[in-house]
Image (cartoon, grey):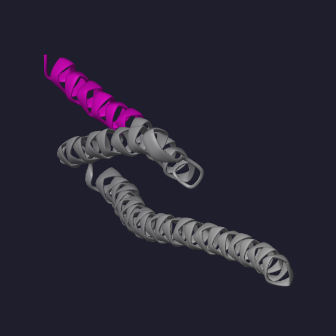
Amino acid sequence: MVYDRCLEKVSLHHLSKMSFGRNLEVAQGLAAAIRNEIKKLDTATGNERTKIDSKIDGMMADLQTKIGGLRGELNKLSQDEKEFSADELKELDKDRADMQTELRRKRQIYSQNSQIQSAHDQNMSKGNQILNSFDDSLAIGNDTTKTQQNTMNTLAEDQILLDNVSKN
């Protein structure tokens, strides 16, 4: 009976160790997937970027939950395993924090670039309005010049006619 209890404790301990290791691997795999998604943000635009960003938020929340679960499982390990596993967990948590920082930085850069692009688009629009006004002004000036030329031609013809009338 004592032997069975010892065997049961060893088995539970072994299962805890295996469970922790497996869950750590799953969390590390999720962290790798998040890094890949963060890299995709560099080339994504518009709607695609929004979808990727949202997906990353969900993945980051999932990773945070997994890290919390691993912290709970850490208490079930032996002291030696706990120290080693705590270091791995600390490294995973640091990796998560670094990814969160990188994500914030990329969001800030994207936001600034969007603001710059928006200001550029507004300036281009105003520039086009000015060019259109300038084109209209040139057209009015050209019409005025034609009218002036026609008036001068008419006056010259009238002068010729008046000179003919005076001679006769």
Residue at 68% of width from left, 74% of height from top?
151
Q: Using the image, determine if residue 167 lies above or below residue 121.
A: below
| Spot occupied by residue 20 in the image (x, y as percentages of width and height) | 33, 38
Quadrant position of the N terminus in the picture? top left
From the viewer's side, name the closer residue of 54 and 143.
143
Residue at 52% of width from left, 72% of height from top?
130
Q: Using the image, determine if residue 7 lies above or below residue 99.
A: above
* Horizontal relation, residue 144 to residue 124: left or right: right
Q: Using the image, determine if residue 59 lies above or below residue 3.
A: below
Q: Main secondary structure of the magenta part?
A: helix
Question: Does the magenta run of residues contain 4?
Answer: yes
| Spot occupied by residue 115 in the image (x, y as percentages of width and height) | 40, 68
| Spot occupied by residue 42 in the image (x, y as percentages of width and height) | 56, 55
Residue 19, image quadrant: top left
Q: What is the magenta range?
A: 1-23
Question: Does the magenta run of residues contain 99?
Answer: no
| Spot occupied by residue 78 in the image (x, y as percentages of width and height) | 26, 48
Quadrant position of the C terminus in the picture? bottom right
* Horizontal relation, residue 98 to residue 70: left or right: right
